[in-house]
């Protein structure tokens, strides 16, 4: 019989009933849910949803963090043939309106008061929305809305229904097919309304199992589920592969305890987008700033050795005996304690995906003995398209095609993919579906790249973002903004960067400083500041950023393909880019076009001759209030370098 997610869950519960399926940290204590506990919970929620009137093929919205009862609700909906639709828990209320109306949602299950308040705020804009169930009752005792009820009450009804109809649940599961729609994930909507990506049980389970076979995952693996369940990357690693393999998923108490929980869990299988790895490295560098002179020297010396021989040791390549001995000493003094401090002592496989990672950042983690690899995929391809094999990991590629995947490069350089994990369709959007899937089944990724001689895929940038400079000393040179931005973001002082240059005579960049890292740097130098805007405008901080920019330029000058992408002018933004202000997607990807329009006065100034520019920007605060931030920004030139005679002829991603 073809697998579905409920069948996989029931199989785990039948073969390993007492084994832990999930752990949730509550009030500082880890609570364990076994596979048999999970199966019972799923049946009760399914019974309650059936009594509430949830129909086969109907959509059910889930809104919250990773929580065992929300995972159980997904399984319960799928057991009844309904379709769970996870939304980003940090989305503002208005961002929930389109998905709810587009999917004609009547029922929502949410985590807590924050999510309840969002839905109540927009309920008048969602005419079909009839019922809201919440998992965490704290703060909701005095709410009197008739549409609102606790998940406990739903489960009580379902428990009684299950007693009265013991065969109902299994009968519903047996009606399910692998070809049924399993879930719908909304894209981040960088160019308009988000699109609902429809996936079947077959597409998600096939990719989950292929990835599990690739890395030989076992039911003894430990995973920390801390990223949004609405992101398909988190969903594949902590839901699809969890059910396919049967390992343990650990849910942190809240966002502020993730770093502590990471150390307590000690995951063996870890997944994070580059921004998480960037943040962890930033904290390491901040701590080293506070260390003694001797400790900083030991760290610097050990890391110099690690960068030279660490990746080779991890890949099983030959390394001299003396270097091996020195590396073991470094492991005892620095690398081992550092892995432990990061929570990576037990990591067997770690992946990064979602966007390109800087090669220096990637190499740092591998140099200290963490088996960090890249994977390539998207919401539409159920994540697993390309993977790095162990002992063949390269910072300039995203790996080789995964089992069952075919890749070819279009005439315009676009990466085309055939995969069993391909979406069924974009919901209610046949035009968009036809744009990305050709008649012969090839999915158009919109990424520019090529396959190298060893079969590894190299991604340059989004096909629409790769451009050319016009005029100036690098006229006609290729411009890949994401590549430039990622190189800048390797520096712990730079949190975000937005590069411009297509069709222009030079490359200019807007930079967000990392407030913690630069704040620590400023305090060490007795440099006073009164918040982000004040710190970002300090001349000393601008010079610090200039140093980072010029180091990137020197590195770019050695790249035969992208030497023309060196940054000529830059500015440090007066505010942090924020998803609530529309500047980032909910997966923290830069919305470059929106930013270019919003800060057009700054873009024009960068390409002009002035050295300062006043700007005033409206912002939205966490409590929903709006305000404005104004500042006079400095526009600075950066030194560029002539292309090196030894420049590589092939782009290094």
Image (cartoon, rainbow, N blue to C red):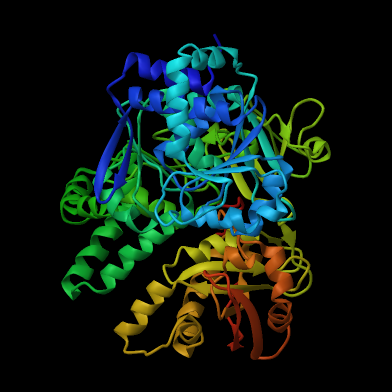
Q: Nearer the viewer, residue 484 or 52?
A: 52
Residue 172 visible in rendering: yes
Q: Residue at x 50, y 38 (%)?
A: 235
Side of 273 where 442 appears, left or right: right
Residue 75: image location, x then y, percent? 50, 28
**Residue 474 falls left or right of residue 200:** right
State the image quarter where residue 439 is shown: top right
Report the side of 96 relative to 154 (left or right): right
Q: Quadrant of the N terminus?
A: top right
Q: Quadrant of residue 506?
A: bottom right
The reply to whether residue 375 is visible in this rendering is: no
Q: Quadrant of residue 370?
A: top left
Q: Is residue 497 above or below residue 4?
A: below
Residue 652 in the image: state x and y as whole percent: 56, 52
Q: Position of residue 144 (x, y in %)?
A: 53, 53
- Please say if 379 is above or below 172: below
Q: Residue at x 70, y 29 (%)?
A: 424
Q: Camera-side residue: 280 or 234?
A: 234
Q: Nearer the viewer, residue 79 or 117?
A: 117
Q: Is residue 223 above or below residue 500?
A: above
Relative placement, left or right, of 467 versus 18 is right
Q: Residue at x 59, y 44 (%)?
A: 458
Q: Residue at x 42, y 57 (%)?
A: 139
């Amino acid at each position: 019989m073809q697998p579905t997610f409920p069948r996989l869950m029931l199989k785990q519960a039948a073969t390993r009933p007492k084994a832990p399926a999930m752990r949730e940290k509550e009030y500082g204590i880890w609570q364990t849910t076994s596979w048999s506990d999970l199966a019972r919970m799923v049946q009760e929620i399914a019974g309650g949803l059936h009594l509430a009137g949830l129909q086969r093929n109907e959509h059910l919205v889930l809104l919250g963090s990773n929580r065992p009862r929300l995972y159980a609700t997904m399984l319960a909906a799928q057991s009844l043939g309904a379709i769970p639709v996870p939304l980003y828990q940090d989305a503002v209320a208005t961002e929930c309106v389109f998905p709810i109306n587009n999917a004609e949602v009547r029922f929502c299950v949410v985590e807590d008061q924050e999510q309840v308040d969002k839905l109540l705020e927009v309920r008048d804009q969602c005419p079909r929305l009839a019922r809201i169930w919440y998992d965490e009752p704290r703060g909701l005792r005095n709410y009197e809305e008739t549409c609102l009820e606790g998940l406990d009450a739903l489960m009580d009804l379902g428990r009684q229904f299950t007693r009265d109809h013991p065969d109902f649940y299994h009968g519903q599961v047996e009606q399910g097919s692998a070809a049924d729609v399993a879930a719908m994930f909304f894209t981040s909507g960088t160019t308009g309304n988000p699109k609902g990506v429809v996936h079947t049980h077959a597409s998600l389970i096939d990719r989950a199992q292929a990835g599990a076979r690739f890395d030989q995952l076992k039911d003894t693996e430990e995973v920390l589920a801390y990223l949004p369940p609405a992101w398909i990357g988190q969903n594949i690693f902590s839901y699809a592969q969890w059910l396919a393999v049967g390992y343990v998923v650990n849910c942190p108490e809240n966002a502020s305890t993730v770093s502590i929980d990471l150390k307590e869990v000690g995951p063996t299988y870890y997944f994070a987008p580059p921004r998480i790895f960037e943040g962890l490295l930033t904290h390491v560098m901040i701590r080293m700033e506070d260390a003694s002179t001797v400790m900083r020297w030991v760290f610097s010396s050990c890391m110099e050795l690690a960068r030279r021989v660490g990746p080779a040791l991890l890949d099983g390549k030959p390394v001299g005996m003396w270097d091996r001995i020195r590396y073991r000493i470094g492991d005892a003094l620095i690398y081992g304690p550092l892995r432990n401090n990061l929570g990576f002592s037990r990591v067997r496989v770690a992946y990064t995906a979602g966007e390109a990672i800087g090669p220096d950042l990637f190499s740092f983690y591998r140099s200290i003995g963490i088996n960090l690899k890249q994977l390539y995929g998207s919401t539409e391809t159920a994540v697993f398209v390309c993977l790095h094999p162990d002992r063949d990991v390269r910072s300039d590629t995203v790996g080789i095609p995964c089992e069952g995947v075919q890749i070819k490069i279009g005439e315009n350089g676009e990466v085309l993919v055939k995969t069993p994990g391909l979406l069924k369709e974009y919901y209610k959007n046949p035009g968009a579906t036809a744009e990305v899937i050709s008649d012969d089944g090839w999915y158009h990724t919109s990424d520019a790249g090529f396959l190298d001689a060893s079969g590894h895929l190299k991604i340059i940038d989004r096909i629409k973002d790769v451009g050319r400079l016009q005029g100036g000393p690098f006229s006609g040179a290729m411009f890949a903004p994401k590549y430039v931005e990622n190189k800048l973001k390797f520096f712990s002082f730079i949190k975000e960067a937005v590069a411009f240059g297509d069709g222009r005579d030079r490359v200019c960049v807007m930079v967000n400083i990392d407030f913690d890292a630069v704040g620590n740097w400023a305090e060490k130098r007795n440099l006073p500041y009164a918040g982000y805007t004040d710190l970002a405008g300090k001349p000393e901080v601008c010079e610090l950023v200039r140093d980072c920019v010029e180091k990137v330029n020197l590195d770019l000058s050695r790249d035969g393909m992208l030497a023309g992408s060196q940054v000529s002018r830059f500015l440090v933004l007066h505010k942090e880019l924020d998803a609530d202000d529309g500047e980032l997607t909910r997966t923290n990807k830069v919305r470059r076009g929106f930013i270019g329009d919003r800060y057009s006065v700054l873009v024009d100034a960068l390409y002009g001759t002035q050295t300062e520019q006043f700007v005033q920007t409206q912002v939205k605060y966490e409590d929903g209030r709006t305000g404005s931030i104004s500042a006079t920004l400095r526009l600075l030139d950066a030194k560029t370098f002539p292309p090196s005679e030894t420049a590589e002829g092939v782009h290094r991603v």
